[in-house]
Image (cartoon, helix red, strand yellow):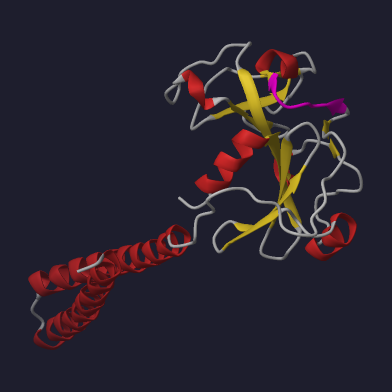
Amino acid sequence: MDNVSLYSLIALVSAIGFFAGIALLIVSIVMTVKKKKKFGLGIAGGIVLVIAGAVFVVVGVLGAFVTVADGLVSNLPMPTEFTPAEGSRPVSSTLKIDGHEVTMPCTISDIQHMGYTTDYEYFNNTVDMWPSDNKNGKYEPPHFLVFIDNSYGYESHDHVRGDDQVSAVKIQYDNGIGIEFNEVKFGMSREEFIKIYGTPAYEIDNPVQGDFLYYVGDNDTIYRFQFDSRSTLWGIMYGTSDYMQKEMNWLYH
């Protein structure tokens, strides 16, 4: 039995238990009223069945949904190599974060010298950075993520060093960070974007995370523009060609 069938069975049995509990509860209450005798065991059993049934119905339905969604993503065809699509053209510019030009690769220290700080904690290949004067505290807007070279062998919650190489940065619309990149603006439509930049070098339409358009940049870099379910620009990621090609494959897992 696969996981979807198992979760579906859990939901079905739990639903039966839920309705059986309601029936037992009603019968016990009616008998208590009519016979002036408390059917406490029946009432207690009915309540337990109703609560447990409701909880496991939710568990079953959510489990089946998550399993199906994960299957949709895992079954997408994985690209074997990054081959720019015919008709695509490179984008020529350098991303600016709050007015600071960010070139790839760089180091944690390079970004700190722009006025950003971090607690150096490494998690899942990422380090969070925020303005030194961020009154909201660490991990709160305004902030953004940087991705370090994964050859250091760090484990989650290890601490990176200032001279570690940053291979990519990612900024989302709700990060509170200002960006400058030609005519690009968060919230612009996919249609507007394509009119300006033309056919992407590569495209991934991920049913869970959105539509990702990749463009080749200057100096062996790649830009990734993420569009949400409303086809509006939601996130920008920019990094070395090697790192971004690996990241492209990670989207399938």
Residue 212 visible in the picture: no
Q: Position of residue 148 (x, y in %)?
A: 59, 25
The number of numbered discs placed on residues in the rendered structure image is 0
Q: Position of residue 90 (x, y in %)?
A: 82, 46
Q: Position of residue 53 (x, y in %)?
A: 24, 70
Residue 10 visible in the picture: yes
Residue found at the very far bottom of the displayed protein: 34
Q: Residue at x 21, y 79 (%)?
A: 16
Relative to 149, residue 161 above or below? above
Q: Is 79 positioned to the left or the right of 227 in the image?
A: left
Q: 61 or 144, which lies in front?
A: 144
Q: 195 or 6, which lies in front?
A: 195
Q: Position of residue 233 (x, y in %)?
A: 76, 54
- The span shown in magenta is 100-106
Q: Residue at x 73, y 24 (%)?
A: 135
Examine the image and state in which quarter residue 221 appears: top right
Q: Residue at x 13, y 88 (%)?
A: 34
Examine the image and state in which quarter residue 12 appears: bottom left
**Residue 105 within the segment the image draws in magenta:** yes
Q: Is 166 positioned to the left or the right of 200 in the image?
A: left
Q: Quadrant of the N terminus?
A: bottom left
Q: 5 or 20, which lies in front?
A: 5
Relative to 159, residue 219 above or below? below
